[in-house]
Image (cartoon, rainbow, N blue to C red):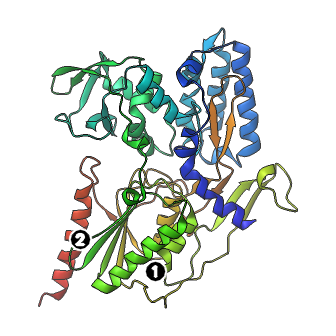
């Protein structure tokens, strides 16, 4: 029973990327133009609400005001007074996403990836820039797809005459995520197709920057960075920074060939031993999660020096797909988790130096559970900015297709406390808080390295 709860967190990384993007969909643009009757839309909402009740252990874990949420839901149903297209229906129900306060819970098109590809092929392209979103403001990061642009860093004022703050408000209401910080980071990844879905279906963009200059851009038929398939060598990298420090970047805690990942981390810790590295920086700022076994075997094997657990208590909904003998369908079960993993301090490649784990707004799911574990058991210090996600994580995501519209719902079936049992309703807070500018991510790593070298120099000074 415990294994079913804890291991299934691995699916979370796939919830809002690979699995949803891989759904079957004939023509995602044409599907959004299909007409739904008021009765069909109400049937979809009722079916989704029942499925949510049958799946989620307790939505109030994340929904701050359940009475307000129920009122909003009733208001949406009461607004169905005539036929709408599926796109209009989507626009009407997706403001619920921001009320869920959970990156593992959403209502959205069946496949965001297929929609993007259809827009590239049929609609003349998308908004031509990658953006960063910070404190309610929109900035140009690069061309769509990641190529450099002379407009890098410029703040957006208007797009096609609509104020950037209005665009921000409209889109942020429809983004899923644990917190505003988390939703801003997710919106940055999805801005191009969210603009098409919820602002305007166009492929020409009059962009006014904050400095007052306005330029017209045509849409680009380029795959956004967030949808580009990353290979092993892009997801997992190792770099010796200087005589004393090294950087291990893990952008996903999952790989189909786990033995390849474990061989990679073994080679990393072998190099640390051979070169006498004293400080290992592990960067998981872009890591949306994966499989707990990946970091337990691939990293904690070499840095854990005491028994550890990745959660102290869990709450789960008993559903047919994951029901063990003696359990009752529909029950909500809460139990302490006392199964500790055994460390290997005598492992020949055990790393006795200092470890710093760098987190950020996109660190999520199993990657946050990793951060919780190393922080609570003292295996590493946490650096960077507070996480976007909460330290108590949901997981075990399930999927549901609304019967008439074909839209896709996602919801978790369990909820994990962090190992210490503390931090309810809180993000993972760094031990060393350093500003992280997403436009210049390398700066934080260099700052950490300098701080360590400065500390080492001070320690040996007479």
Could you tell me which secondary element the residue under label 2 belongs to?
loop
Foreground of the two, 87 or 51:
87
Say above or below: 199 vs 20: above
Could you tell me which secondary element the residue under label 1 belongs to?
helix
Q: Mark 2: few, some, or many residues within 10 Å (few <14, many ≥20)? A: some
Q: Mark 1: few, some, or many residues within 10 Å (few <14, many ≥20)? A: many
Q: Is residue 290 visible?
A: yes
Query: x and y percent of residue 24 in the render?
Result: 62, 34
Q: Is residue 319 visible?
A: no
Query: x and y percent of residue 289 in the render?
Result: 51, 56
Say above or below: 222 vs 373: above
Residue at the spot of label 1: 302
Residue at the spot of label 2: 241
Q: Pick the quarter of the image with the N terminus.
A: bottom right
The disc at residue 228 is: none
**Residue at point 41%, 18% (across, down):** 200
Which image quarter: residue 227?
Answer: top left
């Amino acid at each position: 029973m415990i294994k079913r709860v804890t291991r299934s967190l691995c699916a979370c990384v796939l919830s809002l990327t690979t699995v949803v993007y891989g759904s079957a969909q004939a023509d995602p643009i044409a599907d959004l133009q299909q007409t739904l009757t008021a009765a069909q839309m109400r049937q979809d909402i009722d079916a989704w609400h029942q499925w949510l009740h049958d799946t989620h252990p307790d939505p109030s874990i994340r929904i701050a005001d359940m009475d307000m949420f129920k009122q909003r839901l009733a208001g949406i149903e009461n607004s169905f007074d005539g036929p709408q297209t599926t796109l209009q229906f989507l626009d009407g129900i997706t403001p619920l996403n921001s009320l869920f306060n959970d990156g593992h819970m959403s209502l959205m098109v069946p496949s965001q990836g297929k929609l993007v590809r259809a827009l590239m092929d049929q609609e003349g392209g998308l908004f031509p820039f990658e953006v960063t979103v910070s404190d309610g403001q929109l900035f140009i990061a690069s061309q769509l797809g990641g190529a450099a642009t002379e407009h890098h860093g410029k703040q957006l004022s208007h797009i096609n005459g609509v104020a950037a703050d209005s665009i921000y408000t409209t889109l942020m209401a429809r983004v899923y995520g644990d917190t505003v910080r988390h939703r801003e980071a997710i919106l940055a990844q999805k801005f191009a197709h969210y603009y098409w879905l919820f602002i305007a279906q166009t492929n020409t963009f009059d962009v006014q920057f904050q400095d007052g200059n306005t330029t017209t851009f045509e849409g680009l038929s380029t795959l956004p960075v967030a949808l580009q398939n990353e290979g092993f060598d892009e997801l997992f990298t190792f770099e010796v920074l200087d005589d004393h420090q090294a950087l291990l970047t893990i952008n996903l805690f999952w790989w189909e060939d786990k033995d390849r990942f474990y061989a990679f981390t073994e080679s990393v810790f072998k190099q640390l031993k051979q070169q006498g590295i004293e400080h290992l920086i592990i960067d998981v700022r872009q890591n949306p999660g994966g499989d707990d076994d990946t970091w337990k075997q691939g990293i904690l094997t070499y840095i854990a020096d005491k028994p550890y657990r990745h959660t102290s208590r869990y709450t789960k909904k008993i559903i047919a797909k994951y029901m063990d003998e003696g359990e009752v369908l529909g029950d909500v079960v809460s139990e302490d988790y006392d199964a500790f993993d055994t460390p290997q301090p005598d492992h020949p490649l055990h790393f006795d130096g200092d470890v710093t784990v760098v987190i950020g707004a996109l660190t999520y799911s199993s990657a946050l559970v990793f951060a919780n574990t190393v922080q609570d058991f003292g295996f590493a210090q946490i650096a960077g900015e507070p996480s976007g996600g909460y330290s108590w994580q949901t997981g075990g995501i399930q999927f549901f297709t609304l019967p008439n519209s074909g839209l896709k719902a996602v919801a978790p079936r369990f909820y994990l406390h962090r190992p210490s049992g503390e931090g309810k309703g809180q993000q993972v807070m760094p031990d060393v808080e350093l500003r992280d500018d997403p436009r210049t991510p390398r700066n934080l790593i260099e700052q950490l390295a300098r701080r360590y070298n400065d500390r080492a120099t001070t320690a040996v000074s007479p």
